[in-house]
Image: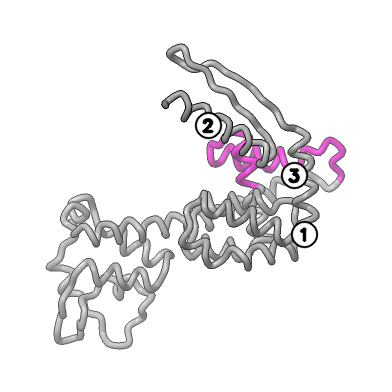
């Protein structure tokens, strides 16, 4: 538990470095002669203003479970939000290292078997204990943020979006040129900071179609050519049918099912 008496004795002289741990933990109005008043809410305000990073993470880590139980509902939610931002910052730092590890593990330029990505992913996957497929996606994300999605990278570092947002942006823009990636970023940010991952994905799809309509049409035609239907068993004597169709066709099927279901209920 945080020793509040010890914290109240902390001195934060006027003009102290506001990036230091002492600043975040010091009482309000503290001077050399007066200890001032101390509360968690003030510390959270200072952390939020400074943004995620080593100093603010250290300040938040001062709290233990007993402190969290004693927080007000508002302060507990604030703490949760601040810690989520720290997680995003740590993910951004981790991806920077992923890109460096992948670059160091890359095979020579003469690679007739096309094993470069596999070698990079194997090194990263072993370090992070990821499955091969997840390791490939993580390397691709790290490279994309480093080379073609600087706005996404900055938002992740600032704690404005999550790793899931970043992965969605990488996947949505993987076939775009650099200038089109920049146009998509400008269109979806800063609104992305207030969106769920599902909302962000919808914004990305619209932005990609706007930034590169020809490419979107080509990809849609290729996807439509692979339309499919499948069925698989479920527990308790049930089964599921999975359809992959162009959106207009799917709407027709859905409306037909809806009409039939309403008629059955009637």
- 158 or 20: which is nearer to us? 158
- Choose top left, top right, bottom left or bottom right for residue 249: top right
Q: Is residue 133 above or below residue 236?
A: below
**What distance separates the C-alpha of mark 1 from that of mark 3?**
18 Å
Residue that carries the numbered disc 1 in the rendered image: 177
Quadrant position of the N terminus in the picture: bottom left
> What mark, if any, has residue 259 been given in the picture?
2
> What mark, if any, has residue 220 been given in the picture?
3
Q: Position of residue 110 (x, y in %)?
A: 87, 44
Determine contact: label 1, label 3, CB under 8 Å.
Answer: no
Q: Position of residue 48 (x, y in %)?
A: 36, 69
Q: Residues within 10 Å of mark 3 (few under 14, many from 20)?
A: few
Q: Is residue 23 above or below residue 245?
A: below
Q: Secondary structure at mark 2?
A: helix
Determine contact: label 1, label 2, CB under 8 Å.
Answer: no
Q: Residues within 10 Å of mark 2 (few under 14, many from 20)?
A: few
The magenta-colored residue range is: 110-139
Q: Is residue 117 magenta?
A: yes
Q: Residue at x 42, y 26 (%)?
A: 265
**What distance separates the C-alpha of mark 1 from that of mark 2?**
44 Å
Q: Which of the marked residues, 1 or 2, is nearer the chain's N terminus?
A: 1
> What mark, if any, has residue 50 been given in the picture?
none
Choose mark 1 or mark 2, whichever is in front: 2
């Amino acid at each position: 538990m945080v020793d509040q008496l010890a914290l109240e004795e902390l001195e934060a002289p006027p003009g102290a470095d506001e990036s230091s741990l002492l600043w975040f933990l010091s009482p309000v109005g503290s001077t050399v002669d007066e200890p001032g008043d101390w509360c968690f809410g003030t510390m959270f305000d200072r952390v939020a203003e400074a943004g995620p990073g080593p100093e603010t993470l250290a300040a938040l880590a001062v709290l233990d479970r007993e402190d969290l139980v004693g927080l007000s509902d508002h302060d507990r939610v604030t703490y949760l939000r601040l810690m989520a931002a720290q997680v995003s910052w740590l993910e951004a730092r981790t991806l920077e290292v992923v890109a460096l590890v992948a670059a160091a593990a890359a095979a020579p330029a003469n690679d007739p078997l096309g094993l470069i990505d596999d070698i990079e992913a194997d090194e990263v996957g072993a370090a992070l204990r990821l499955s091969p497929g997840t390791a490939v996606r993580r390397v691709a994300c790290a490279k994309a943020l480093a080379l073609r999605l600087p706005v996404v990278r900055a938002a992740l570092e600032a704690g404005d979006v999550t790793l899931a947002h970043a992965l969605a942006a990488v996947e949505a823009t993987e076939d775009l040129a650099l200038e089109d990636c920049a146009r998509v970023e400008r269109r979806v940010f800063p609104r992305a900071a207030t969106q769920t991952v599902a909302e962000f994905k919808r914004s990305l799809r619209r932005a990609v179609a706007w930034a590169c309509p020809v490419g979107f049409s080509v990809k849609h035609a290729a996807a439509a050519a692979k339309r499919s239907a499948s069925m698989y068993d479920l527990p308790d004597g049930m089964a599921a049918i999975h359809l992959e169709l162009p959106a207009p066709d799917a709407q027709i099927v859905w409306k037909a099912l809806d009409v039939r279901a309403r008629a059955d209920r009637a």
